Amino acid sequence: MNIQSKRRTKTRKSKPPRTDASRPLPSKGAPAVFLDRDGTICEEVGYVNHIDRIHVYPWAAEAIRKLNQAELPVIVVTNQSGVARGLFSEDLVKQANLKIAMELAAQDARLEAFYYCPHHPTAPLKEYRKECRCRKPATGMMEEAARRFGLNLKSSFVVGDSYRDAQLAFNSGAKSVLVMTGYGKGEYEHRRKSWPRMPDMLAENLLDAVEKILDGRARPASHSRIRTKRKR
Ligand SMILES: [Mg+2]
Ligand SMILES: [Zn+2]
């Protein structure tokens, strides 16, 4: 993937490899909405090992269109460890991403970029076996996007169907929205007792998530506090 090809592969014992990620992130800049792919934009079907298994949720285009209208860049960040596990090729990931992008574009919904992590730390395929900085909940993909588009991650959002996506938000300083599609409902019902920190928001699906994000931006949390102070 792009991210990896830009990185130096040499590693030293004590110091981490010098990478793009060691450069400071832009602290100003625009907010963005980062979306998980499987279970958030399209159905979670286990590994998408054929593009025929891509089924974009019927509400996804409307949700993304609303973000486009609000001028919030929409960026997909997805773990695709099936590549490292030898289940499908990196090329298939690209084809699947393209299929999603085209299906959405046909409904006037625009995605700014796709980032994916093909790695896994204990994967059978040597070339993809690594402790990378892009596998969620590590923030490599978001950092790369932040540099490329001049984004402020702290005012950004991460929407996903797994707790890993919420952790990605925590790790990057963004706000997290857990959707109840894909693994979301099951994780929330059966796993949340073990979560050290709750997601910032819960949503039925991507469209509900977007409406909550836009609603929250229209009425920032500080607004009510300011008003209460003035009232006295
Ligand atoms: Mg997912
Ligand atoms: Zn990776």
Image (cartoon, grey):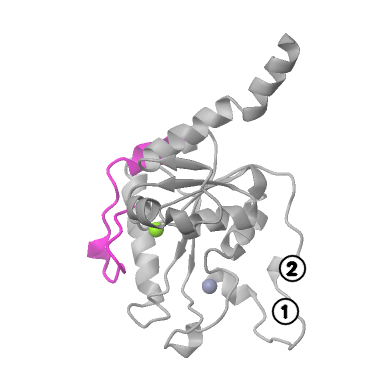
Nearer-N-terminus badge (1/2): 1
Tell me where residue 159 appears, x and y as whole percent.
47, 48
Q: Quadrant of residue 186?
A: bottom left
Camera-near label (1 vs 2) is 1
* Residue occupying image coordinates x 46% and y 49%: 111
Residue pointed to by mark 1: 16
Residue ranking furthest to the front? 193
Q: Is residue 127 left or right of residue 37?
A: right
Q: Residues within 10 Å of mark 1 (few under 14, many from 20)?
A: few
Q: Is residue 220 left or right of residue 44?
A: right
Q: Which residue position is annotated with label 2?
A: 22
Residue 100 lies within the magenta run: no
Residue 99 horizontal/vertical position (percent): 32, 58
Residue in the foreground of this view, choosing between 194 and 144 = 194
- CB atoms of marks 1 and 2 within 8 Å: yes
Ligand 1 appears in which quadrant? bottom left
The secondary structure that dominates the magenta segment is loop
The residue under the point 51% across, 35% down is 213
Q: Which residues are magenta?
A: 42-66
Q: Position of residue 163 (x, y in %)?
A: 46, 57
**Of 5 and 24, the residue lying toward us:** 24
Q: Which mark is residue 113?
A: none
> Is the CB–ligand 2 distance for label 1 below 8 Å?
no
